[in-house]
Amino acid sequence: MRGTIHTRLTVAFIGLAVIPLLLVGSGLAWQTIQVQRAQAVRREQQVAERVAVEVNAFLDGLERELYELALVHDLTKHSHDEQELILAQMLAFEPALNELIVLDAQGREKIRMARLEVVTAADLADRAQKMEFVAPMVTRTIYYSPIWFDANTGEPIVTAGVPLENLRTGEAEGVLVAVIALKSVWDLIAAIDLQEGESVYIVNEVGNVIAHRNPSLSVLQKSPEAGSLYHV
């Protein structure tokens, strides 16, 4: 009987000592997990912000070049041949540009210069109903299309439209359209210093990969982390 009481008391004292330790340990472990999770979230936010800065700087630089081409060079005052020469020089200077197109005030293509193909007069199209013409003519500001993908290469592309204003009259006389390749964004995110096991994806609104640090990753592929990405 005395041994039984002694055993019970011993077990009770051990329980009183161990259970609080387990509770304290569990609480500390939970706090550690929460701290680590918060640190991981902050780290992801910082990486997303750096990617956003790089991508925005890339697009801002192209936008300045397009406005300079449209306004500083004042394309509307140049002849057809002079415009072709200016566009060809721009394509040679800026590798992110796949095509440059001059539309007249009715949305018809007057000139289309392409990096990878020879465009003839028979290839010129009417873009009067396209947003890259309509939006700049109405708002007098640059327009960016949703990202689309080249049917042949799978390359992510964005189309931009810049209004061509006559600097003397202030009237919009057409639109300069640029077809911009976004694969060059891969080089930007590849230069970001990441920790082991981290990766960076840029996806569109439906979760398709637009840019990734691994250039072999196919565009149009769903990102495996698409549900936990930050918007940039």
Image: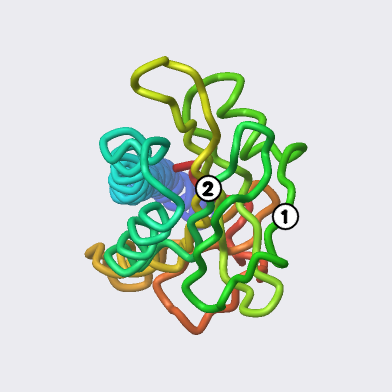
Q: Residue at x 37, y 43 (%)?
A: 78
Quick one: 203 or 145, which is closer to the camera?
Answer: 145
Q: Is residue 24 visible?
A: no
Q: Is residue 105 above or below residue 88?
A: above
Residue 209 drawn above or below residue 126:
below
Residue 180: % across, % down: 48, 57
Q: How many marks?
A: 2
Mark found first going from the N terminus, 2 or 1:
2
Nearest to the observer: residue 51 or residue 155? 155
The residue lying at 62 percent from left, 28 percent from top is 135
Residue 27 percent location from the top left of the image: 40, 40
- State the residue position of label 2: 102
The C terminus - image quarter:
top left
Residue 215 picture quarter: bottom left
Direction from residue 128 to residue 195 in the image, left or right: left
Can residue 190 be seen here? The reply is: yes
Q: Secondary structure at mark 2?
A: strand
Residue 209 quadrant:
bottom right
Classed neighbour count for the residue bearing mark 1: other residues with Cα under 10 Å, few (<14), some (14–19), many (≥20): some
| Res 115 label | none
Q: Residues within 10 Å of mark 2 (few under 14, many from 20)?
A: many
Residue, x 32% and y 59% (percent of image)? 90
State the residue lying farthest toward the right. Answer: 129
Residue at mark 1: 125
User: In the rendering, at what x and y percent does residue 45 appear?
Assistant: 36, 43
Mark 2: amino acid: Val
Amino acid type for the residue under numbered disc 1: Ala
| Residue sitting nearer the eye, 193 or 101 | 101
Give the x, y percent position of residue 165. Answer: 44, 26
